[in-house]
Image: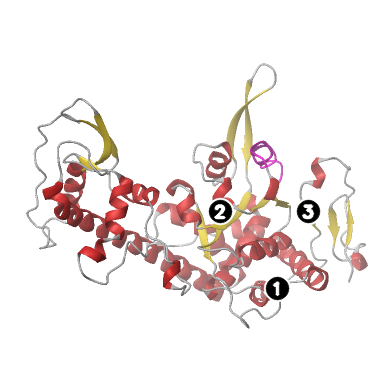
Amino acid sequence: MTSLTTNNVTSLHPEVVDVVPVQPVTPTAQSTLWTTIQPWHEPVESEIFNEIEQVLKSHAHFSNTDDGFLLPFWVAHSNMLGAFEYTPRLWITAPFKASGKTEILKLLQLLCNNAVDGRAVTEAVFVRIGGDEDIAFFIDEGDLVFKFESSDMTRALNIGHEVGASFMRCTGNNHTGTLYPIRSAVAVAGIDLKSALSDTTWSRGIEIQMVKAKRGQITEKFRRRRHLPRLQTLASKLLRWCIDNRDACANYEPDYQDRLEDRDELNWTPLVSIASIASAELGRRMMNLAVSRCSSKEEADDDVLMRLIKDSMVVYKHLEDSLTSFKSNGMSIFGIQSTTMAHELNNMHLWRDDDDQCWSRYNSGNGGYERDLDIGIKPIQLSKLYSKIGIKKKSYKQADKTTFNCLGWTLIHKAYDDYVSTESAEVAGTQVPEFTGGQP
């Protein structure tokens, strides 16, 4: 089967054009920004989701097989974006290069209707065309594109999590305030996205963790000339299923029974709704996946934060006798710089004489990488963790009237009292001295 493309509208089934006529498209510059798929000529059963899952798994290796399961439903949600209140961003990430991130991004782009190749997208384009259609952006190297929380790209990404929200910009010679509706689905690939993105941005999406495939783990490497027709057929069939079931998916209300946080419910509702309409079995599987992932994520976050509070107090106790009223080596009786604290945490296993390397292996990933590739926690990651428990940098005035911008020991001590109390005998009873050298 050949593919006909005119004015960027792809006709996947030329033999049935009498059944599904292709509407003429005015050849404008904007009409070439995304690829429009023609829906299949007859109703499609829910087996289409399993077919797409199997094709994706044949062209890519997933460390978690559930990732291959949920991806077709994310594509389906992008095909009926207006049916939902929120659109989960898709984070395709890995600790290292050559892990299959870009390949998955390309495959999903071929499956989505109105897909935009976002490799060279600018802030202006991202904002202005995001509300024209049910657009799906596919953006590579997201660790570079969205690393600045204050950029228009990142703000638009955050605002667009709510379908139909608007982004305001000044336009024209008079700099008139103009609202641009944003309702685009977005899939982003990048290295260590969780560290590169702000917590606000990261919480608006679902993670796909990739690892580098070993020999034999990919059944058939994707080759466009050979495999594109099959992918086009699947894309056309999925679009037809979405058109026929859009209203049912929009009206479905999952019952999470208070097992998910509000933001997690917003992220997973489109996928759970679509899976539930597809079949009761698929709906149960997607619901269980949502609950297990969100629960494990919350438990992991809680464990890390609790560990950080305890170990920060251990570091304080270790350094206590060497602290002075003036900054020295990034610390004083007032507090400690995040760079110095990261160094101390990464080296705790050395001066504690144990093998626990929680912080020195913080970025080691989940793919069984060699020890010499492990990376310790970074100061920026540490600052983000501290901010979750109310510990932020403050400026303290020292005895010589200079200021020291640092993480205050008083805040660390308060967090320990609030969340740990006397649970750890190792630091129980530790007191931060009254700071007489100056006022924070």
The residue at the point 58 percent across, 79 percent down is 214
Where, by quadrant of the figure, is residue 259 drawn? Answer: bottom left
Along the line of sight, which residue is nearer the eye, 48 or 246?
48
Amino acid residing under circle 2 = Arg
Amino acid residing under circle 3 = Thr
Task: Answer left or right for 379 relative to 320.
Answer: right
Residue that carries the numbered disc 3 in the rendered image = 35
**Quarter of the image that includes the N terminus:** bottom right
Whichever of callouts 2 and 3 sits on the residue coming sooner in the sequence is 3
Image location (x, y in percent) of residue 229: 82, 70
Residue that carries the numbered disc 1 in the rendered image = 45
Q: Which residues are magenta?
A: 122-135
Along the line of sight, which residue is nearer the eye, 121 or 18?
121
Whichever of callouts 2 and 1 sits on the residue coming sooner in the sequence is 1
In this orientation, does residue 122 appear? Answer: yes
Whichever of callouts 3 and 1 sits on the residue coming sooner in the sequence is 3
